[in-house]
Image (spheres, rainbow, N blue to C red):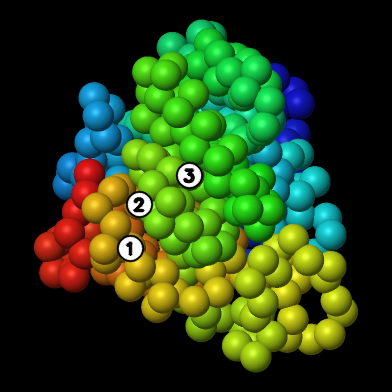
Amino acid sequence: MADKNDRREFLTRTVLGTAGAAAALSLEERILLAALQEGAPQGAQAPADDRPMPYGQIGKLKISRMIIGGNLIGGWAHSRDLLYVSRLFKAYNTDEKVFETLALCESHGINTVQLDPACINVFHRYLTERGGKMQALVCIHPDADAGKVKNQIEDLLSKGATFLYTHGEATDRQTMAGRLDILAKTIELIKQAGVPAGIGSHSLETPMQCEAQNVGADFYVKTFHHDQYWSATTPENRQEWCWYLPQGQQAGTYRDNMWCLDWKKTSEFFKNVKKPWFAFKVLAAGAIHPRMGFPFALRNGADFVIVGMFDFQVAEDVAMFKDAYYKVGNQREREWYA
């Protein structure tokens, strides 16, 4: 208890010291400060408003259209050249804090988390030790060895995964190598396990080729964001597969700073894909404000939005997502496919 109190006092001083005064705090900082001063778990907060969280349907699964991403849990910050941020994420998001954050998301209507397999054990503890009801969209690594893929699937499903998709980088690398047969086999094995199966990617080439070759995905998990933020790669320096090429030091080139190279082309492609699209990196790893990123993704065709959040961001982000969803409604060119 003393450790928790010391931690709370330190964070309170930090928040106030950074802003200079409580009146100057942002809404996120005020939410955090209130929770610290009250000493109450974030999960005890009431929903920000009474508008219902919108849901989609894939097979028998009812899925909140806003999904909490797992990168902040795993410490994958994509913080450009700030080298300490990933460690900071992991130091803040202790197992207990992860439990509180997931419970808070559930109280706001978010019923699904997107996870890397590295985070499945803490998620399993949330289900078994805390009685959590959260669903999990978990990525797996496609492999030429079907036995390895089957083992991944069995292990993840036994620990609470609800439905599966292929890991973005690993999938793109198979596309680069011309091994769509491996992707098709992975999708087949996931379906044999009785759960929906998706294809993940950073590159638009992957879903384009998967659709052309009829790989059989039930849904796609594809990055999507605009390029109107200062650290975006300049247009003349954008290279396909840049995420997997050697990174240079020249200003304006790719350096863990951009995940959707051509949002217009991506949006146009998905207009003709009659399958659910889960858009992730919609805020470009924190570079785009949710009030811009959420409506942009929904208006341009995303059926679901995956967004990483700290506990003190959940209430505000949910309210902004609902604002975006209810304003966009059916006023978009692409139909809703879930």
The residue under label 1 is 270
State if disc 1 and disc 2 touch (CB < 8 Å). yes
Task: Report the mark closest to the observer, 2 or 3.
Answer: 3
* Label whose residue precedes the other's in the sequence (3 or 1): 3
Rounded to the nearest angstrom, the CA distance separating label 3 from label 1 is 14 Å
The answer to which quarter of the image holds residue 154 is top right
Q: Amino acid at mark 3?
A: Ile
* Front-most of residues 119 and 83: 119
The residue under label 3 is 199
| Left or right: 57, with 219 as reference point | left
Question: Could you tell me which secondary element the residue under label 3 belongs to?
Answer: strand
Disc 1: CA contacts within 10 A as few (<14), some (14-19) or many (>=20) = many
Disc 2: CA contacts within 10 A as few (<14), some (14-19) or many (>=20) = many
| Left or right: 71, with 337 as reference point | right
The answer to which quarter of the image holds residue 330 is bottom left
Question: Could you tell me which secondary element the residue under label 2 belongs to?
Answer: strand
x, y percentage for residue 263?
44, 74
Q: Residue at x 76, y 39 (%)?
A: 91
Let me know if residue 240 appears in the view. Answer: yes
* Label whose residue precedes the other's in the sequence (2 or 3): 3
Q: Amino acid at mark 2?
A: Trp
Q: Residue at x 75, y 34 (%)?
A: 6
The residue under label 2 is 277
* Front-most of residues 84 and 255: 255
Question: Could you tell me which secondary element the residue under label 1 belongs to?
Answer: helix
Quadrant containing the N terminus is: top right
Q: Which label belongs to residue 32?
A: none
x, y percentage for residue 166?
55, 39
* Front-most of residues 302 and 10: 302
